[in-house]
Each structure stands twice: as structure tokens, then as C-alpha cells.
Amino acid sequence: MTGETYSLLENYMLSCMQDTTHDREHIYRVLYQALEIAGQEQGVDFDVLIAACLLHDIGRQEQFADPRLCHARVGAEKAYAFLMEHGFGEEYARRVSQCILTHRYRRESQPGSIEARILFDADKIDVVGAIGIARTLTYVGSMSEPLYSRREDGQISDGQGDAQPSFFHEYKYKLEGLYDGFLTERGAQIARGRRKAAADFYNSMLLEVSESSQKGRELLREYVGEE
């Protein structure tokens, strides 16, 4: 891939990125992780991989405006149209589009090519570890969701089984179980190396808020007799 081609794809990507948790830095992190994973694989078409990484989230605006839409499908269609309009071959446009379509794993559209599997893993890696915690907190804040909720007995909930959305709920519902299902050996290895950072943050935060809440409620009862 030439520098001119890269700049063309990058500039189009930049024009589409407005989501704080799926911003351009997310795109670059996914690209860099993908290149690292690709170094351990055989037969990778780097032109397809780089384009797919750069363009994989260009459908986010449409999904944000209409949650019924799938950003992967919208992005695949936009990428295909963009590449065809700019003189890329049909097979190349189709291969890039297919990678984008399957990067958001669904049973009916599983990543098939090596480039698609690498993109899937690289994108998933950006939801694990410390960066996954940071991105989740950013999202929770943007949606005005709380960090945690309380059970009926007044104790801090760890997020397990909560109906109300919160950071703790998101950790238990999604982040905690993300370390299985990687499609490349290197991708799984990178994810495993990040697992402890995420678990340590969650456990430390749960301990801090639980202890503070418990002691604070006991002190409050001493002064006012009730909460």
C-alpha cells in the first residue's frame, strides 16, 4: 500500500469518526494490534487488512442516529462504495467490505478470511484490559449511567444480575467474559496479558465503594438514628 492510498483511506475514516469511545485513536490502536497479530500469521494481504482496520467503524454515525442499524453492515456498504468510487478493484473492495461486515461478531456473519479474523481480534482486544475499562467508563459517562447501583438491602451491587445499567453491570455482563473466543493465537495471548489489569481495577473499586458505604451508613445511624 502506498502512502497516498493510506492517506486517502485515513482521511475518509477521519471524516466519519465522531464517537468518543470509537474515535480515531481507537482505529489506530486496532490497526497497530492487527499488524502485530498479522506478523504471526501466514498469507495475510496487508493491503486488505490495513484498509479494513481503518474503515471498520465508519458506520458508527448511522447506528448512533438509528440504533436499529448495525454499524458493521452500514460500514461495509460505505467502504465498498468508497473503494469502488476511487478506482479500487471489485474483488479488493469486496474483501475489505467482508472484513468490516464480520468484525462485529454475529452467528450469521462469522469472520472467514485471515484478515477478517485478525480485525475481529484486534477490535476485541481494545475492549479488554485497562483500555477496555477506560472506554467503558467514558461510554457510561456519556450515557449518564451510574458507576454502580444498590441492592434492595442498601448494599452496593457488584453488578451481577442488575437490571439497571451501570459500570459494574457492564463489567459483569460483558467485560469479564471477553477473554474467550479469540480467533488467533496471538490475539488470545495479548488479551490474556491484559486481563489482570481490568480485574484489579474492578475489584479495587468495588472494595472501595463497598467499604466506604458500609462504614458511612453505620456512622450515619450513630448520628441520626436512621438513614
Image (tube, rainbow, N blue to C red):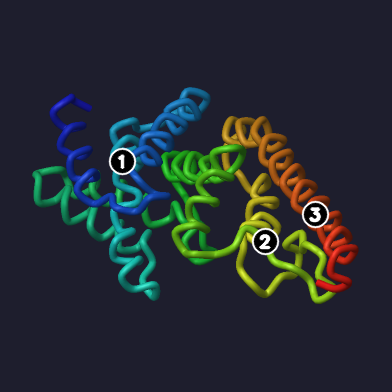
Q: In this orientation, which residue lies closer to the viewer: 227 or 173?
A: 227
Q: CA distance from mark 3 to mark 1?
A: 42 Å
Sequence-earlier tag: 3 or 2: 2
Q: Amino acid at mark 1?
A: Leu
Give the secondary structure at mark 2: loop
Q: Amino acid at mark 3?
A: Ser
User: On residue 148, which mark appears?
Assistant: 2
Residue 124: image x %, image y %?
Answer: 53, 45
Q: Residue at x 16, y 44 (%)?
A: 89
Q: Residue at x 33, y 73 (%)?
A: 66
Q: Quadrant of residue 115?
A: top left
Left of 68 or right of it: where is 221? right
Report crowding for label 2: few under 14, some 14 to 19, many 20 or more residues within 10 A (C-alpha).
some
x and y percent of residue 22 in the render?
Answer: 39, 49
**Mark sitting earlier along the chain (2/1):** 1
Give the residue number, with chain letter if any, for mark 1. Answer: 54
Q: Residue at x 36, y 61 (%)?
A: 71
Mark found first going from the N terminus, 3 or 1: 1
For the residues bearing labels 3 and 1, Cβ distance under 8 angstroms: no
Q: How many other residues sit within 10 Å of disc 1, few (<14), some (14-19) or many (≥20)?
A: many
Nearer the camera: disc 2 or disc 1: 2
Foreground residue among 23 and 209: 209
- Please determine whether, in this image, residue 48 is positioned above or below residue 84: above
Pointer 3 residue: 210
Split into 4 quadrants, where in the image is the N terminus?
top left
Q: Which disc, if any, is residue 98?
A: none
Give the side of residue 116 with respect to residue 58, left or right.
right
Marks 2 and 1, how far apart at CA: 34 Å
Residue 125 versus residue 151 in the image, above or below:
above
